Image: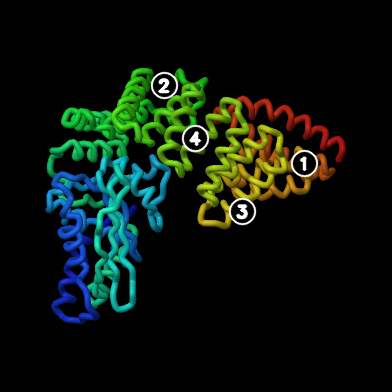
Amino acid sequence: MKKLGCAAIAAALTIALLSCATGGGMGDGLSLQEAIGRTAENALGNLPPGTRVAIVAFETESDGLSEFIMDELANALMGLGIEVADRRNLGLVTRELDLSLDGSVSDESALSIGRMQAAQVVITGRLLDMANARRFIVTAIHVETATGVHVPNLDVRNDRALQNMVAALGGRTQAEITPASSGDRQAAPRTAGDFLDRGMLFISRSDFDTAIMDFDEAIRLNPNFAEAFFWRGLAHMRASDVDFSSIVPFLMFLMDDDRTNLAIADLDEAIRLNTGFAAAYMARGKMRSAFGHFESAIADFTQAIRIEPNNASAYSNRANAHLQSGDTDRAIADFTQVIQIEPNNASAYISRASAHLRSVDRIRAIADFTQAIRLGTYSDSALPHRDLVQAHLSRGDVHFSRGDLDLAIDDYTQALQLDPNDEPFGVWIRGSRGHALYLRGDYDQAIADIEVALRASHQVRLRGGNLIVGRYVGELQELLESARRRR
């Protein structure tokens, strides 16, 4: 999420005040500042002092205006003695939850974000344009009970002051939008929540040891602070310099045993303190899966799903654990559930296609690769570039295995057009297309592709490329010699 610095906020306020002084009123209602202040004081101000809230999102026509409203609302709440989670940590939280804050944010997503920030209440909002007026809408939900706090909607004058403010904030360039702290964050942390916020910022900066010290202090101030144990566990995980989402069991010797043991202990404690902490089950499940403890990992992901039935990431992780443990049918069922929750999730189609290949169901694999390519190319759920290349390569391989050489060659060609210089994929794609051209009898084109693949494989090996490429080279050389003889 983009954020405005103090200078931008001050400039917007100056424009608004000058506009008010020169008139230009339009319609009934409050000024934007009055709406923010009234919402904070009359509705949210009734929350008990010390309540911790997370302002997750505020939907308007521009990032600048959204940030201005959220900063002003945060300042107003803190002035009333309410603790506001530092919004600079939203990026870290949403990455951990595999969520996006683009567009509107569902109540379920907002609650998940609030739990990760140890908030008792989460806040989202919208500023709707209604021609001569605006509607200021705030939604506040208690995290523990998922019940709403009554916050009346307010009408805001769409006068010259607001129009000038919208223009000033909406016209900010990307370079001018800089991270801002919500309220006064320069003072030394005092509460457990303050130390949690700062520790999370240190995680974002990859300063894990300093983050751990802040979480230690948060736990000293509040020994039952489940979120502090959770984030300290994640800091230990990150400090081990291992990507637990992709590590495979036979590489576990690379891990720092002390760090991983501390991480597991902290996640265990977070779950003991809060048995409804889905993110803690997710993190522990990923670690257990990385160690090859698939049964206990699946149990953790299952518990996360019980707590959050629409948690697509939990289904996806459980599917991968099923796949690694050899239960292809259950993996396919879980990937299908991911797709039901997120119909435009192109990556889920690729994963399910790969699972179908494990069960030798090539027809369904082709259908899933096709849908992934369609979504990844033409929808808002664009695939990472390399994944789109991989989808074309994989579908081409399936067509090749079925003897559909023309379709295979088309896919290999698409993959090459997406990234002609990719390594090591370039070796496989050129070699595979060369093989298909050879079988089709196009020996000259086959020779051209195989020669390029061999030159690329040489470069891969010079850079320390894997042994599989080396073995593949022998097959390509035999194919090249045969093509030359047949030409």
Which residue in the protein does label 4 denote?
A: 317
> Which is closer to the viewer, label 2 or label 1?
2
- Report the residue at 15% width, 47% height from top: 48
Q: Secondary structure at mark 4?
A: helix
Circle 1: residue type? Ala
Mark 1 vs 4: CB contact within 8 A? no
Q: Return the disc, 1 or 4, that comes first in the chain's sequence.
A: 4
Q: Secondary structure at mark 2?
A: loop
Give the label on residue 436, or none: 1
Which residue in the protein does label 2 denote?
A: 255
Mark 2 vs 1: CB contact within 8 A? no
Q: Return the disc, 2 or 3, that comes first in the chain's sequence.
A: 2
Numbered marks: total: 4
Q: Position of residue 236 (x, y in %)?
A: 33, 27
> Which is closer to the viewer, label 4 or label 2?
4
Which is nearer the eye, 101 or 383?
A: 101
> Which is closer to the viewer, label 3 or label 4?
4
